[in-house]
Image: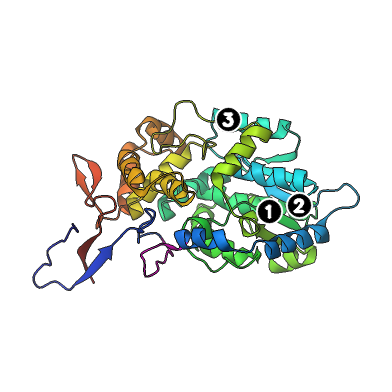
């Protein structure tokens, strides 16, 4: 049964309806998501389409792209961003072992790296890859992360910028014209489908979709402090279109060329690149082999839950449903168990990192809570909704 809120007398109100994908558990609150007449989200539609898609033309596109960029002198011929996790490891492994490319793997060091993340990265490098580890200006990174948290509700916004800008600058410095990112998360997990049938994309897409058009706002905030120069921001600035054209840089997602499968990536990375899982599991999801490289991800997942009503367990459950490893009913039970996970054990770490009091930290969380979906009970935000039970509410207009 849906949950209905009473319309207030004399107040201009509008009825809003929240619902879940009828195949997985993607919510209608997810940015840029769309649904078909069956109630299937575009991630599930894409999953269905992939089963009957003729992948041969796309593989031919890949072979053509690789041959156009393949080095004949032993130089690097493509760049792959990696963290030591399953997806970048898989892409690098495939490029090297199946397609005989010579990838330069690049890692941008996160602010609050984890022991298991460091071990996985070391294992990946030791499995036989050329690798560069970029440590951006930590003062700038920390400020961008903090202001991203404050201005965007995105706890590692500076690092998110750098895994694009610093990787691109590295490719440009080495004059390597081809960069492979892993999956297009918008297409695979629900969001914009504009790039579904495009093999290449550009910096404007990165800024608009992945950075959600907000990086200039964060830059303005950091520049207003007056103690950060343009030179300090070097690793965080996108190259100009002229610089890109001069080198002939191309950006692409591996998921365009073959059916993306996160679990397969995990198995390949485990078998060939030394990937290890967490022994103790995660507080906010039922999986233990993904997003283990930085402590700020748990805060990101919790903020996602407060903003939109779904967290990390919902995303992981959707992946499992779409690959046929879990039923929707099983997923509902797991989401109820895990999604509303306040990262209690890491709070002191976050306060020390952002140099905030607990009251300041909580005020930022409160700022981003969708109060149509949540209400505070005993100083803790609790959902007004039940998972997978559609509901409507009245909101002021």
Disc on the earlier residue, 1 or 3? 1
Q: Nearer the viewer, mark 1 or mark 3?
A: 3
Identify the residue shown where x is 45% and y is 37%.
287
Quarter location, residue 247: bottom right
Residue 300 in view: yes
Dot 3 falls on a residue whose secondary structure is: loop
Cα–Cα gap, marks 1 and 2: 7 Å
Disc on the earlier residue, 1 or 2? 2
Task: Please report contact status of discs 1 and 2: CB closer than 8 Å, yes or no.
Answer: yes
Q: Quadrant of the C terminus?
A: bottom left
Q: Is residue 351 left or right of residue 179?
A: left
Q: How many marks?
A: 3
Q: Is residue 215 left or right of residue 368?
A: right
Q: Nearer the viewer, residue 109 or 140?
A: 109
Q: Nearer the viewer, residue 310 or 249?
A: 310
Dot 1 falls on a residue whose secondary structure is: strand
Q: Quadrant of the N terminus?
A: bottom left
| Classed neighbour count for the residue bearing mark 2: other residues with Cα under 10 Å, few (<14), some (14–19), many (≥20) | many
Magenta range: 31-42
Residue 215 in view: no
| Classed neighbour count for the residue bearing mark 3: other residues with Cα under 10 Å, few (<14), some (14–19), many (≥20) | many
Tell me the residue that label 3 is attached to.
Answer: 276
Cα–Cα gap, marks 1 and 3: 23 Å
Residue 197: percent from the left, percent from the top? 60, 68
State the mark number for residue 126.
none
Work out which residue is located at the far right of the displayed protein and give it.
73
State the mark number for residue 78.
2
Dot 2 falls on a residue whose secondary structure is: strand
């Amino acid at each position: 049964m849906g949950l209905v809120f009473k319309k207030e007398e004399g107040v201009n109100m509008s009825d809003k309806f929240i619902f879940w994908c009828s195949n997985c558990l993607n919510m209608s609150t997810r940015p840029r998501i769309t649904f078909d007449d069956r109630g299937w989200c575009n991630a599930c539609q894409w999953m269905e389409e992939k089963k009957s898609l003729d992948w041969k033309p796309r593989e031919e596109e890949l072979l053509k792209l690789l041959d156009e960029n393949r080095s004949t002198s032993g130089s690097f011929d493509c760049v792959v961003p990696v963290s030591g996790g399953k997806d970048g490891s898989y892409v690098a492994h495939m490029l090297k072992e199946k397609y005989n490319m010579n990838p330069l793997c690049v890692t941008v060091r996160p602010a609050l790296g984890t022991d298991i993340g460091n071990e996985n990265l070391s294992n990946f490098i030791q499995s036989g890859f050329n690798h560069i580890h970029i440590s951006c200006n930590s003062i700038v990174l920390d400020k961008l992360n903090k202001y991203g948290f404050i201005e965007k509700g995105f706890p590692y916004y500076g690092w998110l910028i750098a895994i694009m800008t610093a990787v691109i600058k590295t490719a440009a410095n080495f004059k390597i014209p081809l960069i492979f990112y892993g999956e297009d998360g918008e297409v695979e997990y629900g969001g914009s489908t504009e790039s579904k049938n495009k093999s290449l994309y550009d910096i404007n897409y990165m800024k608009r979709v992945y950075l959600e058009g907000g990086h200039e706002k964060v830059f303005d905030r950091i520049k207003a402090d007056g103690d950060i120069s343009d030179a300090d921001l070097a690793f965080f600035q996108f190259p100009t279109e002229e610089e890109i054209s001069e080198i002939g840089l191309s950006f692409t997602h591996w998921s365009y060329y073959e059916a993306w499968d996160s679990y397969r990536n995990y198995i390949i990375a485990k078998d060939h690149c030394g990937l290890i899982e967490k022994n103790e599991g995660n507080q906010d999801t039922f999986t233990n082999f993904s997003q283990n490289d930085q402590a700020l991800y748990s805060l990101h997942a919790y903020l996602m839950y407060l903003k939109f009503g779904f967290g990390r367990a919902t995303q992981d459950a959707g992946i499992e449903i779409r690959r046929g490893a879990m039923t929707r009913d099983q997923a509902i039970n797991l989401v109820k168990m895990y999604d509303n996970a306040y990262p209690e054990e890491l709070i002191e770490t976050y306060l020390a990192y952002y140099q905030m009091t607990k009251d300041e930290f909580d005020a930022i969380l409160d700022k981003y809570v969708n109060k149509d979906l949540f209400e505070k009970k005993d100083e803790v935000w609790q959902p007004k909704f039940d998972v997978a039970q559609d509901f409507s509410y009245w909101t002021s207009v």
